[in-house]
């Protein structure tokens, strides 16, 4: 064989006696076929067969199978981001003339996809009070195809009565999709509570290290999976096996990370309630959080993300105080090892449940730093704000 040919044909080595605990990262565009006949018949391999790298490799199928098992589903599809996972469900199951119900506290870009992408294409949406429960029945129209839920809601943390909402929707033949990113399948399994789609931003707790973007949709009905796969195939959307390999590593420690950040976030939330700079703490573990009883009934613990509403009066001091942080970092996204703080603009993102608190809202994501050091910095930040706000508060 010529050297140039040797360069492009890797030698086949024995895999006999080799077993690793790591899932191999299979990179592929081309998938090889035994013969011309099986190549010609590749369209009959179905969605579980291997046909082209974009549509799945053993690496991506491993993460899909793992998420499917964790969610008590039947299949999972992977997409390049959490936002894509949400919008894929919308794009697949909503046609012009259809209608979707979306909670008023949903992850911001979900409101945007409804307003800026679906609406111009003749797909209507109605924003609803996340605490509506079984009352969702009153908003279902003849063309309503999908009810979206997200619990606890982004930023303001209201917990939704998903079993009640799902029961009302299913009674009318309406699909229910749940953004489960805060809970992960370890704390809540939407498919067990009547939902048709369990969506995760794997970017957050599954990835766990702020270095990847991925999303997933898990279903318990093969026909729904087929619909999702057909859209992914038509639009040419797939995921990188390298991102998936990072997620396969991250998911191994998710249980330990989540247990830790959940415990710390609950402890901090309880203590922060008494701080003079804090108007309100928004954490589902607190009886004052809207939907706390539902959290206690349905959700098996806490994630590491919660919010605080500051008393008004310290606005001018807020940015310098945040800039001075050394342990907490300022940034969006969450679920990694670093603790983050992000000021949230809630007011402009509300339509049917007006946000009336005048003070700033800070979203806090607890990471894996030493707990005492985190608490000391949080206390320093709030003490500075309390001092700055004191004259206004008096
Ligand atoms: C971050 C997030 C998303 C989007 O995930 P990306 O991977 O960043 O696109 C969706 N829903 C919720 C609740 C999130 O927190």
Image (tube, rainbow, N blue to C red):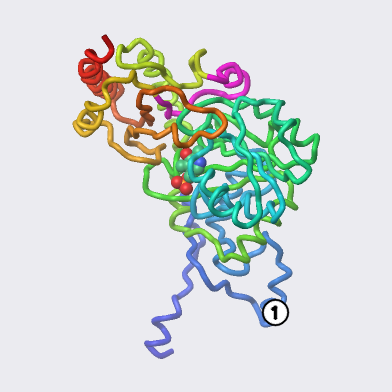
Q: Quadrant of the N terminus?
A: bottom left
Pointer 1: what residue?
Answer: 40
Task: Name the foreground residue: 168 vs 346.
Answer: 346
Residue 49 visible within the image: yes
* Residue 336 position within the rendered picture, expressed as x and y whole percent measured from the top left: 38, 38
Which residue is located at x 21 percent, y 15 percent?
A: 387
* Residue 68 position within the rendered picture, expressed as x and y whole percent measured from the top left: 63, 44
Task: Name the foreground residue: 93 vs 313.
Answer: 313
Q: How many marks?
A: 1
* Residue 19 position within the rendered picture, expressed as x and y whole percent measured from the top left: 49, 53
In the image, taking residue 80 as reference, residue 138 lies left or right, namely: right
Vertical relation: 222 (above or below) 254:
below
In the image, taking residue 36 as reference, residue 296 lies left or right, namely: left
Task: Name the foreground residue: 108 vs 194.
Answer: 108
In the image, taking residue 53 as reference, residue 36 lies left or right, namely: right
Which residue is located at x 64 percent, y 60 percent?
A: 231
> Is ligand 1 closer than 8 angstroms to the Cβ of mark 1?
no
Q: Quadrant of the C terminus?
A: top left
The kind of secondary structure element at disc 1 is: helix
Which residue is located at x 43 percent, y 26 percent?
A: 306
Q: What's the magenta region?
A: 290-307
In which quadrant of the rendered view does residue 33 lie? bottom right
């Amino acid at each position: 064989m010529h050297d140039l040919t040797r360069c492009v044909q890797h030698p086949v080595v024995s895999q006999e006696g080799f077993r690793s605990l790591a899932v191999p990262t299979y990179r592929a565009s081309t998938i090889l076929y035994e013969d011309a006949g099986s190549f010609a018949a590749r369209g009959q391999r179905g969605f579980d067969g291997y046909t082209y790298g974009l549509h799945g490799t053993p690496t991506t199928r491993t993460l899909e199978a793992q998420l499917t098992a964790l969610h008590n589903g039947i299949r999972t599809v992977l997409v390049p981001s959490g936002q894509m996972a949400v919008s894929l469900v919308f794009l697949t199951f909503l046609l012009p003339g259809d209608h979707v119900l979306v909670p008023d506290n949903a992850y911001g870009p979900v409101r945007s996809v409804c307003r800026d992408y679906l609406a111009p294409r003749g797909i209507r949406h109605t924003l609803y009070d996340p605490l509506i429960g079984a009352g969702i029945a009153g908003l279902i129209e003849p063309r309503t195809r999908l009810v979206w839920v997200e619990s606890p809601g982004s930023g303001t943390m209201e917990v939704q009565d998903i079993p009640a909402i799902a029961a009302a929707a299913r009674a009318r033949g309406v699909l229910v999709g749940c953004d489960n990113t805060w809970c992960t399948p370890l704390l809540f399994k939407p498919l067990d509570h009547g939902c048709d789609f369990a969506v995760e931003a794997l970017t957050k707790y599954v990835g766990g290290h702020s270095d990847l973007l991925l999303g997933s949709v898990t279903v318990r009905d093969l026909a729904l999976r087929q619909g999702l796969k057909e859209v992914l195939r038509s639009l040419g959307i797939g995921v990188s096996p390298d991102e998936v390999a990072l997620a396969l590593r991250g998911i191994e420690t998710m249980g330990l990370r989540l247990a830790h950040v959940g415990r710390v976030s609950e402890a901090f939330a309880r203590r922060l309630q008494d701080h003079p700079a804090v108007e309100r703490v928004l954490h589902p573990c607190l009886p004052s959080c809207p939907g706390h009883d539902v959290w206690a009934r349905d959700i098996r613990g806490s994630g590491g993300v919660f919010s605080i509403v500051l008393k008004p009066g310290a606005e001018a001091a807020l940015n310098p105080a945040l800039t001075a942080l050394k342990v907490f970092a300022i940034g969006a996204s969450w679920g990694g090892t670093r603790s983050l703080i992000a000021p949230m603009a809630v007011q402009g993102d509300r339509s049917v449940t007006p946000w009336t608190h005048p003070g700033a809202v800070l979203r806090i994501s607890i990471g894996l730093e030493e707990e005492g050091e985190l608490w000391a910095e949080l206390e320093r930040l709030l003490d500075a704000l309390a001092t700055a706000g004191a004259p206004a508060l008096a």
